[in-house]
Image: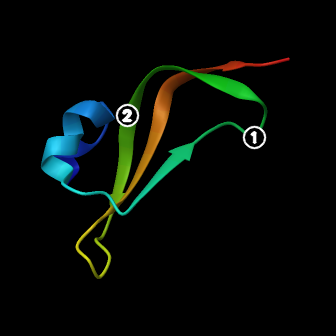
Amino acid sequence: MDESLLVPLREARGSLGPIGRLIVLAPPHPAIGIGELRVLRVDPADAEGRPTVIVSYEGYERLA
């Protein structure tokens, strides 16, 4: 799945197939995501053949 790394999630969905869990990494403070969600890591598939996909936005804007 290395070919999916840093690719926008919407583009990677076809090669990933069904996703078991989608985890969005975010800053530890209130923020809004800016840009597209990009694939950071794809973990091995679960018993049903669905991988865990970890994503993050291209940037974040801190909220007050």
Residue at x 49%, y 29% (from the top left corner): 57
Q: Type of residue at label 2?
A: Arg
- Left or right relative to 16: residue 19: right
Is residue 20 visible in the rendered image? The answer is: yes
- Left or right relative to 47: residue 63: right
User: Residue 28 shows which numbered tag?
Assistant: 1
Quadrant hosting residue 47? bottom left
Quadrant hosting residue 19? bottom left
Residue at x 21%, y 32% (from the top left corner): 11
What is the x, y in percent for residue 7?
27, 33
What is the x, y in percent for residue 30?
77, 30
Q: Quadrant of the C terminus?
A: top right
Q: Type of residue at label 1?
A: Pro
Judged from the image, the secondary structure of the residue bearing numbered disc 2 is strand
Q: Please report whichever mark, 1 or 2, sits nearer to the chain's N-terminal start.
A: 1
What is the x, y in percent for residue 53?
38, 54
**Separation of disc 1 and disc 2 at Cα?**
19 Å
The residue indicated by pointer 2 is 38
Q: Is residue 53 above or below residue 35?
A: below
- Left or right relative to 38: residue 61: right
